[in-house]
Image (tube, rainbow, N blue to C red):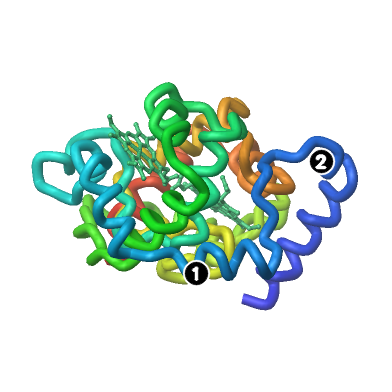
Amino acid sequence: MKMGYVLAGILLAAIGGQVLAEPSTQVAWTPETLKFVRNGDPEKGKAIAESCDACHAATPENAESEFPYLQGQTATYLYKQLHDYRSGSRSNEIMVGISAGLSDQDMADVSAWYSRQPPPPAKKEEEVPDRIRKLVDRGDGARIIPPCSVCHGRAGESQVLDTPVLAAQKAAYLEQTMLAYKSEARHNDIYKRMRLIVQQLSDDEIKQLARYYAGLER
Ligand code: HEC
Ligand code: HEC
């Protein structure tokens, strides 16, 4: 574990100044913003979520779709993503359109609602190879890849403020969004934390990591 923090430190130091020049998001986690998100009203959020559930509900019908689960995700992560779609920091035709109709308050409210919903079921496939578990728990010093667990938690439960829960997320979504970081089509990760990591991973490792997390209970 300690090694993980060291590696993460090296990674952050290595990428230092250059990326600060161009902000990848307009969300800054000041105490005010944090308080604002934490005070989101889940009951108001519930009404908004009725228009989201066509795609995001954790129903068996939706299980095979590419739409990510939002249930049990952290409110801070959800809020940042909605804000990023609206500001153009993260692109996706559907979500950019939808977020345009949401105020900051709506975003805090709907994030509060989804973060409190029961988690989706994990979808466990066959065991992933040991080398994938190693990437998660220990990283790879040779490629300067910190362990995923340093930021995402040992069980994919989210460890650091703005990192998402990965456990039980759909494998297809996890894979396509990591590939999007790799090609920089997705570039809303502050300090390039995810882009620098996945650019060191092969497409097969990305696929296996996605399957690994999809199989963990949230
Ligand atoms: C027509 C289908 C559709 C509807 C309706 C919809 N979404 Fe989405 N949503 C998507 C898709 C597709 C993605 C993945 C986009 C991408 O890859 O960037 C997504 C992604 C997201 C994400 C990012 C999740 C993550 O793990 O990064 C959030 C947050 C989100 N939607 C919230 C909402 C909210 C809140 C609403 C309702 C106000 C909503 N969505 C309505 C299709 C939809
Ligand atoms: C230094 C911290 C850090 C490490 C280490 C890290 N991540 Fe992340 N990860 C983040 C942050 C922060 C985000 C959210 C960025 C954003 O706002 O788009 C993220 C987002 C993601 C997402 C997008 C989830 C979604 O719902 O869209 C995936 C998938 C992911 N990480 C997988 C991994 C895997 C697999 C590893 C290990 C190989 C890893 N991460 C290592 C910090 C980290």
Identified at 58% across, 70% down, the residue is: 35
Report the label total.
Answer: 2
Which one is closest to the eye, mark 1 or mark 2?
1
Question: 124 or 133: nearer the eye?
Answer: 124
The kind of residue on which mark 2 rests is Val
CA–CA distance in space, label 1 to label 2 = 28 Å
Which residue is identified by label 1? 38
Residue 73, position as x, y percentages in the image: 38, 59
Q: Quick check: can you spot residue 121?
A: yes
Question: Disc 2 beta carbon < 8 A from ligand 2?
Answer: no
**Residue 88 horizontal side relative to residue 174, left or right:** right
In the rendered image, residue 17, in percent from the top left (x then y), is placed at 89, 46
Tag 1: amino acid: Arg
- Who comes first in sequence, dot 1 or dot 2? 2
Identify the residue position indicated by label 2 in the image: 19
Q: Quadrant of residue 133?
A: bottom left
Classify the position of ligand 1 by quadrant: top left, top right, bottom left or bottom right. top left
Residue at the far left: name it.
Answer: 60
